Amino acid sequence: MYTLYFLFTSFFPIFFVNYVKCTNFATQNMSEPLAERLRPRTLDDYIGQKHLVGDGAVLRKMIDAGRISSFILWGPPGVGKTTLAQIIANKLETPFYTLSAVTSGVKDVRDVIERAQKGRFFNEASPILFIDEIHRFSKSQQDSLLGAVEKGIVTLIGATTENPSFEVIRPLLSRCQLYVLKSLEKDDLLELLHRALTQDVYLKERHIELKETGAMLRYSGGDARKLLNILELVVETAGDGDVEITDTFVEQCLQQNPLAYDKDGEMHYDIISAFIKSIRGSDPDAALYWMARMIEGGEDPQFIARRLVISAAEDIGLANPNALLLANAAFDAVMKIGWPEGRIPLAECAVYLATSPKSNSAYLGIDAALGLVQRTGNQPVPLHLRNAPTKLMKDLGYHDGYKYPHDFPGHFTPQQYMPDALLQERLWHGQHSPAEEKLYERMISYWGERYK
């Protein structure tokens, strides 16, 4: 019955159902890329992510128990997200549907859910629906998954390279566990190279001497798929004879800038983090260096400009309000003139931000306000602050007693603006920079002890 079901569903290219048992490396298809030939079929063959699938780890326990809940795998490319989902389906012997967020629409999602519901047998485990690049799904596409996930019609496994808290709708995220996958470490990559050279049906027949690995590891950036693609390219370039792999030979084969980085990989986030922290730490030299690393790596100039705008608001803030204006101007300039001249306004902005006085009082203030709202809920608005567009509202006292500040000397008069229960709360605390000291002193002159 399973075979007939597979044959029936295989006519639909948007997904497939996988009932194939675990296979070993002896069944490798020579027409497949090396990365596909070496794709692990069991957890014992899976490299890396010991915090999730090692002995006693959370995912390992669920898989061994034979029941898993819906979850999302977040990590850089080439760390085993798709492979892990396939291993789980094989281990649980359950139907495995896959959708690509790039090519599938709401109708495709609903079709898969309907077929999963009809094809389920008695009390067997829910079919697994694997969605690659789930962050590319629109809100409506993600909404269409909610009912099926909540009712257990399918067990959702999503894979994403983007932060799910930004890209996945909150109702769906609340129904899924989140597991973070890490870039493969040096030992993991070396183990993968050894496995490729000793277990791949083609490579193990070649005489391949791995004299140096530095360039291969550097170019791979912790990405297993990229590492195996590099190895395959190097071996093919060497021809039919013996193969001696050195760093120089790898660089000649790839003909790439060794300083370039994968814009979707972990180094991308490490470098932008170093860039922002250099600005925050008032080091213009370091800020320019990390910006140059991003430019040389082919980073999108809009991404750099957006980070400068965020930095201006978060780290410079009220200490120099002109910083945000300049960051926005730099963003507009880059959009207008593009590369390579766009590097100049970006550099001007980076230096200006790094050399500016710093304050995060507004950033801390809004976070404190959000925290207060979450703790205290919907406090009533004082009557004198409420709008009164109707007679009934006026009769109820809405707007009654409100003092219009512009009617008073200095455009200020004391009155209550916070809810009754929060009169003693302080959210904004002025910091010690010349510009912000003036704001702080003005608040003391207005409110007295409240701001001391």
Image (spheres, rainbow, N blue to C red):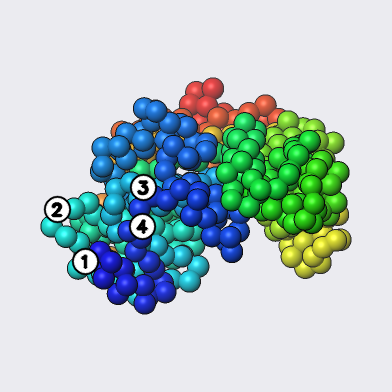
The label nearer to you, 2 versus 1, is 1
Q: Position of residue 253 (x, y in %)?
A: 81, 53
Q: Which mark is residue 1?
A: 1
Residue 324, percent from left and from top: 69, 49
Residue lying at 46% horizontally and 65% vertically, measured from the top left: 100
The residue positioned 28% from the left and 66% from the top of the image is 3
Q: CA distance from mark 2 to mark 1?
A: 16 Å
Spatial distance from mark 4 to mark 2, Cα to Cα?
A: 21 Å
The residue under label 2 is: 123
Which three-letter amino acid code belongs to the residue tagged 1?
Met
Q: Earlier in the sequence, mark 2 or mark 1?
A: 1
Residue 305 falls left or right of residue 224: right
Return the disc, 2 or 3, that comes first in the chain's sequence.
3
Residue underneath mark 3 = 88
Please identify, in this view, whether the residue under mark 4 or under mark 2 is nearer the observer: 4
Q: Residue furthest bottom?
A: 11
Check disc 1: other Cα within 10 Å, few if <14, some if 14-19, many if 20+: few
Residue pictured at 26% horizontal, 69% vertical: 5
Under mark 2, the amino acid is: Asn
**Mark number displayed over residue 20:** 4
Q: Gap in Å between the C-alphas at discs 1 and 4?
A: 14 Å
N-term-proximal mark, 1 vs 3: 1
Q: Residues within 10 Å of mark 4 (few under 14, many from 20)?
A: few
